[in-house]
Image (cartoon, rainbow, N blue to C red):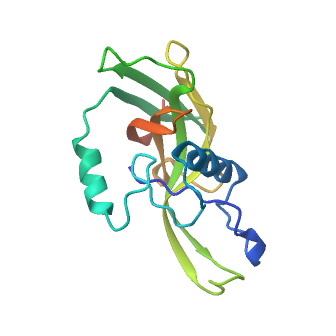
Amino acid sequence: MVLAWHVDYWDYLGWKDPFGSKAHTARQKRLLEAKKIRQMQTPHLLVNNTPPASGKHKEALADAAQRKARVRVDGTATLVAKKIKVAAKLTRIDETLEFAQGFGVVPVLYRKTATTTCAAGENKGATLVEYFVVLATRDALKPGGDLNAEFDLPAGLAAGDLGVALLAEDGLAMETLDCVALPVSAGP
């Protein structure tokens, strides 16, 4: 699952990214600290929240695909009265895995595609097509607790424009153990 977490630290260049967020910038900083990465950059490609060795993107993706699953996350995302109701299920595959402090399922609302026109900055006048843009997240849902979350339906968008990703993460180590992309279906 590819997700675009737009940051806000380039806004000073004269064009505010409509998808940029202080929360996304903070998440990137936590990730860099956990992975002992010295410099923030964009774009910053990460595979399972880890930067591939220089020029090794394909190999990192192949390695990630072969990694033995330790947990499985699944769920549903249903649009009911302008609210996207998310229900998650977490299954422990590796019985030796301890759900340590910081572990949980992070619900992420994303927009499948978006088009923006840059009014200023280095891309002034350019039309950008964005994919899998993170619009909102919720705090990690803790194992053993209620694995439900809710998002407001963004103005001007329909269920078909959106998706929900569920990230099973060790939030302290910033490790993603599993991820699933869910369509937003129309509810009753």
Q: Quadrant of residue 156?
A: bottom right
Res 186 visible: no
Residue 170 against residue 124 in the figure, above or below:
above
Q: Is residue 161 left or right of residue 156?
A: left
Q: x, y percentage for residue 88?
A: 45, 26
Res 168 visible: yes
Q: Nearer the viewer, residue 127 or 139?
A: 139
Residue 153 against residue 102 in the figure, above or below:
below
Q: x, y percentage for residue 176?
A: 43, 38
Query: For the point 70% across and 61% down, which residue is it?
Result: 8
Residue 57 against residue 139 in the figure, above or below:
below
Q: x, y percentage for residue 17?
A: 67, 67
Q: Is residue 35 left or right of residue 125?
A: left
Q: Quadrant of residue 37?
A: bottom right
Query: For the point 46% across and 51% down, which residue is it?
Result: 160
Query: For the point 37% across and 19% down, which residue is it?
Result: 97
Residue sticking out furthest to the bottom: 125
Q: How many marks?
A: 0
Q: Nearer the viewer, residue 62 or 180?
A: 62
Q: Nearer the viewer, residue 2 or 70?
A: 70
Query: For the point 73% across and 75% down, which residue is it?
Result: 15
Q: x, y percentage for residue 112?
A: 47, 57
